[in-house]
Image (spheres, rainbow, N blue to C red):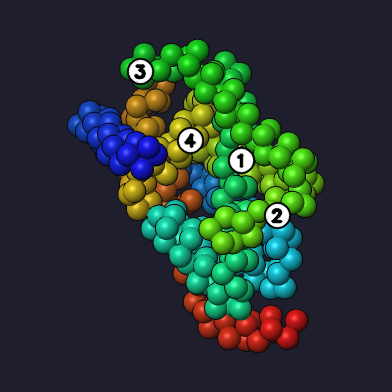
């Protein structure tokens, strides 16, 4: 059933996003966007860059929860560096390339077996989306957001979605509390839940990361829109971007922001903020990720020997 739904849902969602983008593209004040970019004070861009790099650094800690969970012996700094490099590629080339394939390669090159690598990736993904469920659920269910009339979703439905989202991390915590220490086998691979304490760390890390991302966009918009609204649009754009198999979610972020905030912020200023966000959160960390990847590949043999000795 799910493969059939996914086969049709993704193209339909893609067409809807494409329609949103096309419907707004001819209205975009590109000259105003460029002018807005040039008007950013250097201090604001520096603060935004610090927030962006801080978010990427925090994401690197997601894999440290996997290190604690699996008990592997790779150094903390190397585990963190693999996660940061993978995240930079993930944002720009897609989750299968950066989030899974690159991460699996770097861990395997460092000497970890397939089972541990799978558990680390699962812990990182669960950390990210459990925090998303908590932040988005709390925000959507609070009633603080009011959707534009152009969005085919009522505010009551949005609040119901928020309640469901909040149930996911709550269920995860209860499962960790109830079944931690028990082992299952999924497709021949051993699976076990983390401790409740580690699950709380996962939620804290991810909640802080999503909040940082929202703060970055709020700063770039100059406080023209309430923080809760900026964060809500970012959360919506993120989940749409995951459903769309487009590298870097190109066009998706722009379409969602234009659809939800074009009535609150002049389009030139709005597009300027989105383009600045892309440059600071996607492209700048990608340059760092390329350097990290080159270093991790170069030192992989030494890391594997050290891991075997440990």
| Disc 2 crowd, CA 10 A, few/some/many (<14, 14-19, 20+) | few
Q: State the residue at coordinates (77%, 40%).
A: 178
Residue highlighted by disc 4:
234
Q: State the residue at coordinates (64%, 81%).
A: 303
Q: Quadrant of the N terminus?
A: top left
Mark 2 or mark 4, whichever is nearer to me: 2
Numbered label attached to residue 177: none
Label 1 element class: helix
Label 3 element class: loop
Locate residue 236 relative to residue 188 in the image: left or right: left
Label 4 element class: helix
Q: State the residue at coordinates (70%, 50%).
A: 193
Q: Quadrant of the C terminus?
A: bottom right
Residue highlighted by disc 2:
183
Locate residue 202 relative to residue 188 in the image: left or right: right
2 and 1 marks in contact (CB < 8 Å): no
Mark 1 or mark 3, whichever is nearer to me: 1
Residue highlighted by disc 3:
152
Dot 1 or dot 4: first in sequence order is 1
Nearer to the camera, 98 or 150: 98
Dot 2 or dot 1: first in sequence order is 1
Label 2 element class: strand
Task: Determine the CA span between mark 4 and mark 3.
Answer: 18 Å
Residue highlighted by disc 1:
130
- The percent position of residue 270, horizontal first and vertical second, equals 39, 33
């Amino acid at each position: 059933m799910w493969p059939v739904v996914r086969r049709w849902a993704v193209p339909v969602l893609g067409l809807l996003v494409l329609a949103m983008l096309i419907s707004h593209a001819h209205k975009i004040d590109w000259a105003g966007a460029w002018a807005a970019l040039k008007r950013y004070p250097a201090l604001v861009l520096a603060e935004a860059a610090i927030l962006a790099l801080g978010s990427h650094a925090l994401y690197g800690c997601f894999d440290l929860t996997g290190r604690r969970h699996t008990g592997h012996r790779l150094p903390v700094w190397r585990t963190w560096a693999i996660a940061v490099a993978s995240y930079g590629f993930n944002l720009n080339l897609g989750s299968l390339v950066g989030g899974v394939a690159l991460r699996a390669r770097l861990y395997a090159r460092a000497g970890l077996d397939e089972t541990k690598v799978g558990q680390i990736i699962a812990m990182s993904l669960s950390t990210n989306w459990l925090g998303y469920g908590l932040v988005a659920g709390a925000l959507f269910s609070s009633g603080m957001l009011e959707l534009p009339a152009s969005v085919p979703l009522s505010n009551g439905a949005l609040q119901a979605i928020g309640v469901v989202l909040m149930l996911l991390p709550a269920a995860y915590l209860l499962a960790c509390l109830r079944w931690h220490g028990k082992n299952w086998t999924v497709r021949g691979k051993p699976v076990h839940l983390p401790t409740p304490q580690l699950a709380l760390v996962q939620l804290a890390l991810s909640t802080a990361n999503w909040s940082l991302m929202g703060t970055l966009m709020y700063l770039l918009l100059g406080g023209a829109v309430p923080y809760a609204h900026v964060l809500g649009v970012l959360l919506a754009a993120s989940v749409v971007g995951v459903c769309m198999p487009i590298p870097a979610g190109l066009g998706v972020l722009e379409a969602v922001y234009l659809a939800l905030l074009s009535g609150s912020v002049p389009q030139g200023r709005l597009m300027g903020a989105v383009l600045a966000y892309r440059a600071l959160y996607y492209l700048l960390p990608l340059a760092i990720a390329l350097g990290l990847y080159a270093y991790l590949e170069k030192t992989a043999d030494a890391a594997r020997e050290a891991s075997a000795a440990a």
